């Protein structure tokens, strides 16, 4: 079966209604029912609770508390690199952009302008730059950390669809990551601006950041933007910046420059928070 045929049912599903229902279940304090749901999830997806700061599944009041669980201290040591991997998960795609085009999957590209919510002048800052798209599966740790130091300047909530973001859907739905609901976080660093996008998906109840809390608690259907010119939101490399309340995908954009990705990285490969993502080439 082709990927396009495989994803056809997703066009027909009431994705927003399913996501709303899943969010309610994930927030519910269901006692034993919540514990049974968590136990099933751990078995089904083979979640490694041995590395969780709190491995006792019966102690989590809600499924969201379990899903956004912290790791034990030292479970993810940070490599010495200009850019570290911000999540646990798998590599979807990464590499150089062709002007404003980002590779989604073989034969599929989408524009940086579409990804950031339509601001073409801002998106042009990343023409011929670099990108990385990282997929978080249900079993993964779902907090997102900073790949490098950054000062927050803008946050944009872009409403959209809620297709699944698994590899089959990425191959079968054109413009997937610029089509789904997403939260665009814009940072400034010593090497210029960079972007980290939290992409929503089917049954992703919410996306949250450490400076704002839940961003999409109300889905108004309108693009919303926050500016941080009058606030100092500084985050260090490796520090938590946000989390998914049920899992999804992170897309990062970096401006044009001599960026060299980890030579061990390959599409589909497993990744862990804190490993080397990329370094800037040093001039001789």
Image (cartoon, helix red, strand yellow):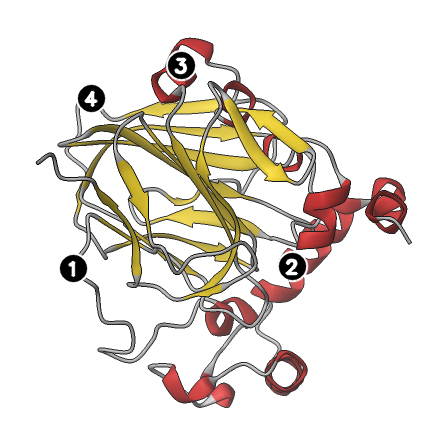
Q: Nearer the viewer, mark 4 or mark 3?
A: 3
| Residue drawn 70% across the image and 34% down it | 107
Q: Residues within 10 Å of mark 4 (few under 14, many from 20)?
A: few
Q: Residues within 10 Å of mark 2 (few under 14, many from 20)?
A: few
Distance between the alpha carbons at the discs numbered 3 and 2: 39 Å
Left or right of residue 77, residue 60 in this image: right
The mark nearer the N terminus, 2 or 4, is 2
The mark nearer the N terminus, 1 or 2, is 2
Marks 1/4 in contact by CB < 8 Å: the verdict is: no
**Residue 75 visible in the picture:** yes
Q: Nearer the viewer, residue 166 or 71?
A: 166
Left or right of residue 49, residue 209 in this image: left
Residue under numbered circle 2 = 24
Total labels: the figure holds: 4
Residue under numbered circle 1 = 80
Residue under numbered circle 4 = 229
Left or right of residue 41, residue 157 in this image: left
Distance between the alpha carbons at the discs numbered 1 and 4: 30 Å
| Dot 2: element | helix
Task: Work out which residue is located at the far top of the displayed protein and give it.
Answer: 121
| Dot 1: element | loop
Residue 35 versus residue 155 in the image, above or below? below
Marks 3/2 in contact by CB < 8 Å: the verdict is: no
Q: Quadrant of residue 258?
A: top left
Distance between the alpha carbons at the discs numbered 4 and 3: 21 Å
The mark nearer the N terminus, 3 or 1, is 1
| Residue drawn 44% across the image and 90% down it | 56
The mark nearer the N terminus, 1 or 4, is 1
Return the x and y of residue 61 as percentages of the image width and height: 50, 77
Residue under numbered circle 3 = 124
Q: Nearer the viewer, mark 1 or mark 4?
A: 1
Residue 115 versus residue 148 in the image, above or below? above
């Amino acid at each position: 079966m082709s990927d396009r045929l495989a994803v056809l049912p997703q066009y027909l599903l009431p994705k927003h209604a399913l996501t709303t229902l899943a969010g309610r279940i994930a927030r519910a304090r269901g006692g034993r029912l919540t514990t049974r749901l968590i136990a099933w999830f751990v078995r089904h997806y083979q979640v490694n609770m041995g590395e969780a700061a709190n491995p006792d599944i019966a102690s989590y009041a809600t499924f969201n508390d379990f899903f956004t669980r912290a790791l034990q201290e030292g479970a993810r040591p940070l490599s010495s690199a200009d850019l570290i991997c911000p999540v646990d998960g798998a590599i979807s795609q990464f590499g150089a952009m062709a002007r404003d085009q980002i590779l989604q999957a073989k034969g599929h590209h989408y524009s940086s302008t579409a990804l950031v919510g339509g601001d073409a002048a801002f998106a042009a800052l990343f023409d011929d730059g670099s990108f990385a798209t990282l997929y978080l599966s249900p079993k993964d740790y779902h907090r997102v950390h900073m790949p490098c130091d950054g000062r927050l300047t803008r946050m944009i909530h872009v409403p959209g669809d809620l297709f699944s973001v698994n590899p089959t859907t990425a191959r079968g739905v054109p413009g997937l990551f610029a089509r789904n609901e997403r939260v665009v976080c814009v940072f400034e660093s010593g090497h210029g601006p960079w972007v980290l996008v939290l992409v929503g998906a089917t049954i992703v109840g919410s996306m949250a950041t450490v400076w704002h809390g839940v961003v999409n608690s109300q889905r108004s259907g309108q693009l919303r933007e926050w500016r941080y010119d009058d606030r100092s939101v500084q985050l260090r490399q490796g520090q938590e910046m946000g989390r998914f309340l049920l899992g999804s995908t992170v897309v990062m954009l970096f401006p044009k420059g001599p960026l060299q990705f980890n030579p061990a990285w390959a599409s589909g490969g497993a990744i862990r928070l804190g490993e080397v993502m990329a370094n800037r080439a040093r001039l001789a």
